[in-house]
Image (cartoon, rainbow, N blue to C red):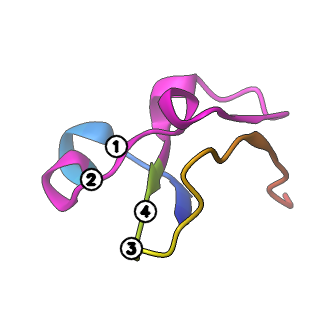
Amino acid sequence: MIILIGDPAYYNHYGFEQASQLGIITNLEIPATYILAKRIGKNDIEDFSGTASIPV
């Protein structure tokens, strides 16, 4: 799984979706719409959830 901070209008074209829809949250003060995730393999965990820590 790839998790990034970016513009949803751009990254949605590449299969990214809001990470919160996959059960992923962050502890950053960034709007959830900009935290994006994409499953990259058929072996990715189906029920994936948790808090992503992004170093600043």
Contact between marks 4 and 3 (CB within 8 A): the answer is: no
Instruction: Name the amino acid, label 4.
Output: Arg
Vertical side of 49 occupied by 46: above or below:
below
Left/right of residue 19 with respect to residue 9 in the rendered view: right
Mark 2 vs mark 3, foreground winner is 3
Marks 1 and 4, how far apart in space? 18 Å
Q: Which residues are magenta?
A: 12-36
Is label 4 in a helix, a strand or a loop?
loop
Residue type highlighted by circle 3: Lys
> Looking at this view, is 42 or 20 the one in front?
42
Q: Point out the tag, 2 or 3, that comes first from the N-terminus.
A: 2
Q: Are marks 3 and 1 in contact (CB under 8 Å)?
A: no
What residue is at 59 percent from the left and 60 percent from the top?
45
Which numbered disc covers residue 7?
A: 1
Q: Which residue is mark 4?
A: 39
Residue position marked by numbered label 2 in the rendering: 11
Secondary structure, mark 3, is loop
Q: Earlier in the sequence, mark 1 or mark 4?
A: 1
50 lies left or right of 43: right
The amino acid beneath tag 2 is Tyr
Q: Quadrant of the C terminus?
A: bottom right
Report which residue position mark 3 lands on. Answer: 42
Q: Which numbered tag is attached to residue 36?
A: none
Residue displayed at 58% across by 23% down: 31
Does the magenta segment cover residue 24? yes
- Amino acid tagged 1: Asp
Q: Quadrant of the N terminus?
A: bottom right
* Classed neighbour count for the residue bearing mark 3: other residues with Cα under 10 Å, few (<14), some (14–19), many (≥20): few
Q: How many marks?
A: 4
